[in-house]
Image (cartoon, rainbow, N blue to C red):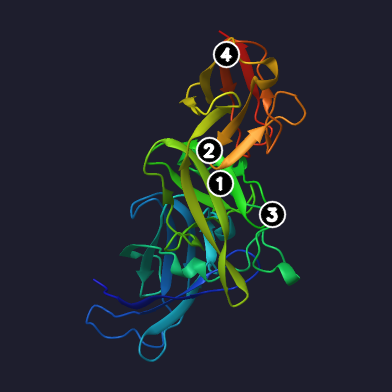
Amino acid sequence: MKHFYFLLLFISASLMAQVPQGFSYQAVALNSAGHAVASSPVKLRVSILDGSATGSAAYVETHNPTTNNVGLFTLTIGMGTPTSGTFNTVNWAENSKFLKVEIDVANGTNYITVGSSQLLSVPYAMYAGAVAGMGSGSNAGMFTSLYMYGTFNSYNASTAIRMAGSDGFTCYKYLTAGTQVKFIPSQSSTVAYGDGGGYQLATNGAAFPIVSDGIYNVYVRVTGSTNDTNIYSAYFESIAVKVTPSFTNTITPMTYNAGTNTLSCVINVPTYVDATERRFSFIIGSGIFGDNLGNGSIDAGGTEISIPGTGNYRVTLNLNTTGDGSPYTVTAQ
């Protein structure tokens, strides 16, 4: 039985183009007697597994390096001979990834499995300043757009939520406890950003967890820079949505209905309230929204919304991800 021993797994990520083209792998091969297989070709099969050490293979390639005089060999994973899948289309953002290595020290195809180990964020975080969706030149290291996705949409990039903004980004979204969230620079990106520590965005970082049900103001902004690359941090603020009538100091909270994706509440307008005072605004987090155009959708800082009469009125809001343009209705009860 042949034996082999791996000294060092990852050295660095290769910085080529806009997505990771490979990362270095170094090891020593030993024969069954424990001696180095020196100055000889060996055959390896490398697989990127999805989700677990026994998951399905997202990508498989082979290598045929030659060891040096102490049995050491080096190769670049991602630059071998593909036998299944395409390396630059591996969705590193979805699920954890594991590296499975098999070897035949006799340079054949009678592979013996070395094992599977999880790929951590280090190999991919090194190219954070050169990913699709960031600017160039004077805007290097700046996102030009940002989208949010996660378990709430099965990490489907094509239905990721576009966040409002151009340097800082924000959106509103109802999220349930246990939801996992990441960010991508475009809906066609295979590079995603998670938590690299301290809520700072890093490529292939851990998913941001949502700890309780609620409507969240999710925002991402620049919080520093290093080597001319901006450091972005994510914030998840659980917010309340309320209405504030002009004729009373009482602020009425709105209740969210997950089935209809709407918020609603009832406002009571006493008979003594003059028609000119029958108005209200929405409070979403710390922002105040009205309706500048009177077209049934809200605007940040917009004009107060009229209530047509006295008595009870149900106010319903379908809060979209940017707030602005969210449709509302005011219906007599």
Q: Residue furthest front?
A: 272
SS for tag 4?
Answer: strand
Residue 103 percent coordinates (x, y): 37, 69
Q: Residues within 10 Å of mark 1 (few under 14, many from 20)?
A: many
Q: At x 57% / y 13%, what residue is drawn?
A: 313
Query: Label 4, label 1: how many angstroms apart (C-alpha)?
Result: 35 Å
- Which marked residue is nearer to the observer: mark 2 or mark 1? 2
Q: Which residue is mark 1?
A: 148
| Camera-nearest residue between 308 and 183 | 308
Q: Is residue 259 above or below residue 28?
A: above
Identity, as a three-letter code, of the amino acid under mark 2 = Lys
Q: Is residue 264 above or below residue 287?
A: above
In primary-sequence order, the first of circles 4 and 1 is 1
Query: Label 4, label 2: how many angstroms apart (C-alpha)?
Result: 26 Å
Query: Label 2, label 1: how many angstroms apart (C-alpha)?
Result: 10 Å
Identity, as a three-letter code, of the amino acid under mark 4 = Tyr
Q: Are marks 4 and 3 in contact (CB under 8 Å)?
A: no
- Image quarter of residue 96: bottom left
Q: Which residue is mark 2?
A: 173
Q: Residues within 10 Å of mark 3 (few under 14, many from 20)?
A: few
Q: Is residue 260 visible?
A: no
